Image (cartoon, rainbow, N blue to C red):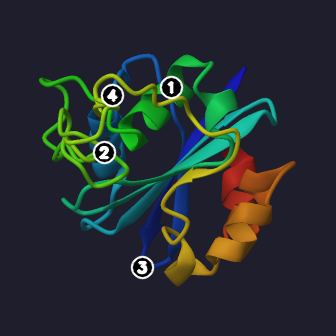
Amino acid sequence: MYFAALLARTEDGWEASDTELDEVETLTDLADLAREAAVDDDTVVAFIEQEDAWFGVVRVDGEEDPRVFVSHAAAAAKSSYGAMLTEELLGREDDDTSDLDSLDLDGTEDGEPETDPNDDNETTAESTSHAPPPGPLGDVELLSDLGVGPKELLMLENDALSQIADALGCTDVLEAVR
C-alpha cells in the first residue's frame, strides 16, 4: 500500500494534496504533477511511502530538475514507484523519457570503461550490475534549507514523512490528506 502526497509551499505556509500516482510512470511525470500543484513556481515536495518499508522525497523548484532521495533503495526497487525513483538515481533512464544527462554514479558516461582500458579486466558501465544499495540513495541535502539536514534525513525510519512534515511546519496539513 502506497501513500503519496504533494506539499506546495505558498506565501501562507504549505498546502497539501493527496496524490494519485496511477498516471505517473516516470520521474518526469511526477515532476510535472508537482509543478501543476505549485503556487507561483515555488517549492513542491512530493512524498511517497510504502508501508514503512521505504519512503521517497522528490523536490521540485520551478523548472529546475527534480531532486530525489530514497530511504532504502533496495527495498524501494522492488516496487513500481520505488523502482522509478531508484532507476533514475542509478542512471537507468529510458532514452525517450528523460532529458537528464547520462552520467553514471561514478562520473563516467554510459558505455565508457570504468577501469583502465589497458587492464585485462574489460568491465564497462553497461556490463556492470547497478544493484540498488541496501540503504539510502539520492540527494541528502534536498530539504536542508527547509529544516531537515542530511543527518536528520538519514536517521529517519518509522513515520518519517510525519517527522519531515513536523520540521517543515505542516504536520496538520499532511495529516489532513493522510
- First in sequence: mark 4 or mark 3? 3
The image shows residue 6 at horizontal and vertical percentages of: 50, 48
What residue would you read off at disc 4? 26
- First in sequence: mark 1 or mark 3? 3
Measure how far apart labels 2 and 3 are at the Cα level. 51 Å
Q: Residue at x 57, y 42 (%)?
A: 5
What residue would you read off at disc 1? 83
Residue 3 visible, this orientation = no
For the residues bearing labels 2 and 4, Cβ distance under 8 angstroms: no
The image shows residue 97 at horizontal and vertical percentages of: 19, 27
Measure how far apart labels 1 and 3 are at the Cα level. 34 Å
Measure how far apart labels 2 and 4 are at the Cα level. 31 Å
Residue 124 visible, this orientation = yes
- First in sequence: mark 2 or mark 4? 4
Viewer-proximal residue, 53 or 125? 125
Question: Where on the picture, by quarter, is residue 22?
Answer: top left
What residue would you read off at disc 3? 11
- First in sequence: mark 2 or mark 3? 3
Please tell me whether mark 3 sits on a helix, a strand or a loop. Answer: loop
- First in sequence: mark 4 or mark 1? 4
